[in-house]
Image (tube, helix red, strand yellow):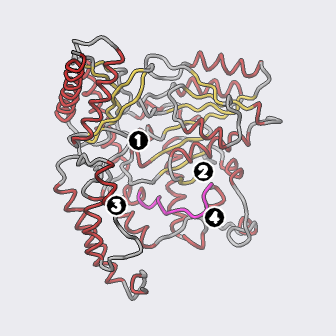
Amino acid sequence: MRSHLLNDTTAESYRRSVTEGIERVAAKLATTTRPFTGVSVDALSPRIDEIDLDKPLLDTAAVLDELEDVYLRDAIYFHHPRYLAHLNCPVVIPAVLGEAILSAVNSSLDTWDQSAGGTLIERKLIDWTTARIGLGPVADGVFTSGGTQSNLQALLLAREEAKADTTAKLRVFASEVSHFSVKKSAKLLGLGADSVVSIPVGADKRMQTVALARELERCKQDGLVPMAVVATAGTTDFGSIDPLPEIAELCEQYGTWMHVDAAYGCGLLASVKYRDRIDGIERADSVTVDYHKSFFQPVSSSAVLVRDASTLRHATYHAEYLNPRRMVQERIPNQVDKSLQTTRRFDALKLWMTLRVMGADGIGQLFDEVCDLAAEGWKLLAADPRFDVVVEPSLSTLVFRYIPSSVTDPAEIDRANLYARKALFASGDAVVAGTKVQGRHYLKFTLLNPETTVEDMSVVLDLIAGHAEQYLGESLDRAS
């Protein structure tokens, strides 16, 4: 079994195995004609259930053949131009190369004696990102597993920085369409069930700052502590961007930590055309970025950034076997001092490779393309009487609803839209997302693939309408 360990004696075996795997994936990518096969849970589960993991195949080619049957054939392929569902981007080749390298070397980014150059590369990328944001000369941060972890750490720092004699008095303010991880983080941080104050949004799905000001003032008058305001730069459902400058003014007025969840909108940091849409982000105390959403990176590649590096001390614990306090005096850079994680992948390498091959403008141009595509999609939907589109996009998301001319019952229209999404997914012809707007079911295009065209969107809209009409026709037949 030692022949399977990656070392100096097995380098050639490693090359052959990885090459064989890459060739399988490359062939799959080259021949995939739909984003999904439409396989059902009931059809796929038995194929996996029948595999006995205690009886290995003992042959890489045989395992890859089996993997084709249980995974590669039915995987959902985000690179396909008619995958339009969630915040999953196609990935760039330099980042995939970085993924292969970091997996093989397997550095752990917690301490210097496990990562050396990797530590410095990650720190360089953090400095690059904080400079792009404009957080100032004492900014810092660390890579994380994703936006949820970044939001949790940011709110942990805000909690520790807040001056309150009990967590029961702490309040967090976020828009009604902010990410669910805000409430989840509050629970994990031991805050009360009513600690997150939901701020209404306008028709543009942006936080109403008049309402925020009112709630902040009420908080003070009630003897509570406004711990943090979470502004969103790219909501998951609508891609909307809260009014960051106005929120920054209120946070300064009330002495409140300003966190910007830019997990989605961080692509604008590299944008050639639309960077001004996140003006005001430079005034944040902390920022979440997900490179694996809008920098075209493989999962995971994310970070939390802070204006004041000293606030990261709230995540610092010292262990004699790992990062004893003496290392601080010796100026040994241990990233575990800043992180909620201990063992941590060298995910920063993927972004490093991307920037060194493509440059920031190359990334920004790709993100600008999907923003432009969303603007064209808005025009397409607004001109189509079959659909109701909710809000003009700030980024690359479109939320809409099929409205049949022959049906007026909102519940029946809900069912038609739900059926259309399900039927489209089962066909494998396209994948779209769904959400609720004011209690009603809507569909969603999340456009993160520059290869998607207006024609692709038009075809998918016709498919949706066809499935919805099929449902309504069958419903009418049942009723008669």
Q: How many marks?
A: 4
Measuring from the top left, give residue 363's x and y in whole percent.
Answer: 34, 47
Q: Are the residues tagged 1 and 4 within 8 Å (C-beta)?
A: no
Q: Nearer the viewer, mark 3 or mark 4?
A: 3
The residue type indicated by label 2 comes to: Asp
Splitting the image into 4 quarters, where does residue 58 fall? bottom left
Q: CA distance from mark 2 to mark 3?
A: 45 Å
Q: Nearer the viewer, mark 1 or mark 2?
A: 1
Precedes in sequence: disc 3 or disc 4: 3
The residue type indicated by label 4 comes to: Asn
Precedes in sequence: disc 2 or disc 3: 3
What is the span of residues highlighted in magenta in the rendered image? 340-350
Q: Nearer the viewer, mark 2 or mark 3?
A: 3
Q: CA distance from mark 3 to mark 4?
A: 41 Å
Task: Look at the numbered disc 1 and give the secondary structure of its residue.
Answer: helix
Residue 428 lies left or right of residue 324; in this view the side is left
Outermost residue to the bottom: 9
Measuring from the top left, give residue 378's x and y in whole percent.
Answer: 28, 24
> The C terminus appears in which quarter of the rendering?
top left
